[in-house]
Amino acid sequence: MKSVLITGVSRGIGLSIAKEFIQNDYFVFGTSRSIFDLSEALNSSNCQHLILDVNDRDSIASIMKDIPGENNTLDCLVNNAGITADQLFMRMKDSEWDDVINTNLTGIFNITKPVSKMMLKQKSGSIINISSVSGLMGNAGQVNYSSSKSALLGFTKSLAKELAPRGINVNCICPGFIESDMTNELTSDQRDQALSQIPLGNFGSDTDIAKLTLFLSSDNAKYITGQSISVDGGMYM
């Protein structure tokens, strides 16, 4: 049985990705910052929840001892954990900048480094980073978030070049507007404004991201690396 490590697994895109992998016979290691019953959420025993803050390097080192699957390998890492702290730039607190950059960018460095070492030894693996359309086109009130997500594009390309000779693929997914708690809070006018920017005329779903993530982890995508793929209904072209 193949295995995958997914960060930020307790809700939204992360949970949908976990369900997609479970349904395709993966063992899922899923992390979140608080207690979460992953087995119940996935209706499966082929999973293990790990409490983890990606900013805590000591904690990461500790859980890595529990990560290898039954074949003593880890086939895929999905870097999904992330936060927002939206604010106009001139009002943005130092802590709002630091927290977002530390979690969304440095946190990915923290978890990817030990996983890369594991994959280098096994000479195989797939790393998938979840970025955002905001990292491609920017968004007012999200200088911190857009900066962190834009940086993932360079992170992905550079790491892909380093790891490709050892059979490890690194790719990035950039979701656009996805139906979520955030989009549910939009007013009717805000929703109409957002939809007007999307040529396909509708928001995406968590499943759209999950299915692409599974594809990029599979042998069907073995010749794809260093790419940042938008899933946004044509919002950014």
Image (cartoon, rainbow, N blue to C red):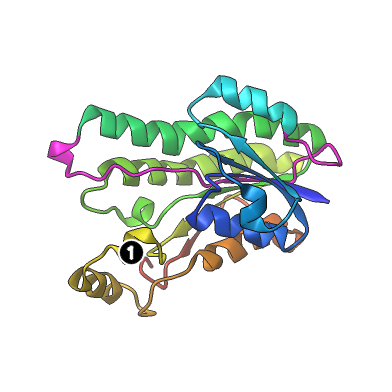
> Of helix, strand and loop, which mostly describes the magenta segment?
loop
* Residue 230 percent coordinates (x, y): 47, 62
| Quarter occupied by residue 235 | bottom left
Does 80 lie within the magenta span?
yes
Q: Secondary structure at mark 1?
A: helix
| Residue drawn where x is 27% and y is 28% of the image | 95
* Residue 39 percent coordinates (x, y): 67, 50
On the question of residue 168 being in view, the answer is: no
Q: Quadrant of the C terminus?
A: bottom left
* Residue 162 percent coordinates (x, y): 64, 36
**190 to the left or right of 210:** left
**12 to the left or right of 161:** left
Q: On screen, 97 above or below 169? A: above
Q: Callout 1, which amino acid?
A: Thr
**80 to the left or right of 222:** left
Does 110 lie within the magenta span?
no
* Residue 195 percent coordinates (x, y): 29, 74
| Residue drawn where x is 21% and y is 52% of the image | 140
**189 to the left or right of 219:** left
Local crowd at mark 1 within 10 Å, few (<14), some, or many (≥20)?
Answer: some
Check disc 1 and report the residue beneath it: 183
Magenta extent: 67-92
On the question of residue 151 being in view, the answer is: yes
| Residue drawn where x is 76% and y is 50% of the image | 46
- Which of 151 and 13 lies nearest the eye of the viewer? 13
| Residue drawn where x is 37% and y is 64% of the image | 177
